[in-house]
């Protein structure tokens, strides 16, 4: 397996370095890596701070939706489709 030169690596961002490294793996190895990344992402739950009391109720005095959790869930659903 080849290595990225130190000079080239210093000019690359993390995403570019990851892509360059992934190009060196076989299809079978990549399948295993993708599986591991999916499991890791599912295990990591974002930590959320408690909302202030005033934010927990809408103007109509009903419970306000947790928009942050809804966006996070939507992103996870989109990622699962990849």
Image (cartoon, rainbow, N blue to C red):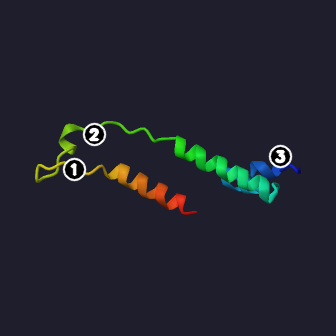
| Label 2: few (<14), some (14–19) or many (≥20) C-alpha neighbours in 10 Å | few
- Which residue of the protein is positioned furthest toward the right in this rendering? 1
- Distance in Å between CA atoms under marks 3 and 2: 45 Å
- Judging depth in this view, the residue of 18 and 43 nearest the camera is 43
- The Cα atoms of the two marked residues, 1 and 2, are separated by 10 Å
Q: Residue at x 54, y 63 (%)?
A: 81
Residues under numbered marks 1 and 2 in contact, where contact means CB atoms less than 8 Å apart: yes
Q: Secondary structure at mark 1?
A: loop
Residue 62 is at least partly visible in this image: yes
Nearest the viewer among 49 and 39 is 39
- Is residue 12 among what the camera can see? no
| Residue 38 at x, y percent in the picture | 60, 50
Above or below for 77 versus 45: below
Point out the frontmost of discs 3 and 1.
Answer: 1
Q: How many marks?
A: 3
Q: Earlier in the sequence, mark 3 or mark 1?
A: 3
Badge 2 element: loop
Residue 6, numbered label: 3
Q: Are marks 3 and 2 in contact (CB under 8 Å)?
A: no
Marks 3 and 1, how far apart at CA: 51 Å
In this rendered view, identify the residue nearer to me: 29 or 17: 29
Element on which disc 3 rests: helix
Q: Position of residue 67 (x, y in %)?
A: 32, 52
Picture coordinates of residue 40 (x, y %)?
59, 43
**Residue on which the image places disc 1:** 64
Q: Is residue 40 above or below residue 80?
A: above
Q: Check disc 2 and report the residue beneath it.
A: 51
Q: Quadrant of residue 51?
A: top left
């Amino acid at each position: 397996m080849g290595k990225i030169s130190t000079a080239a690596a210093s000019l690359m961002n993390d995403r570019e370095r990851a892509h360059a490294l992934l190009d060196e793996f076989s299809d079978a190895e990549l399948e295993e890596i993708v599986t591991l990344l999916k499991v890791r992402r599912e295990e990591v739950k974002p930590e959320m701070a408690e909302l202030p009391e005033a934010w927990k109720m809408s103007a109509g005095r009903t419970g306000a939706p947790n928009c942050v959790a809804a966006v996070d869930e939507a992103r996870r659903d989109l990622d699962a489709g990849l």
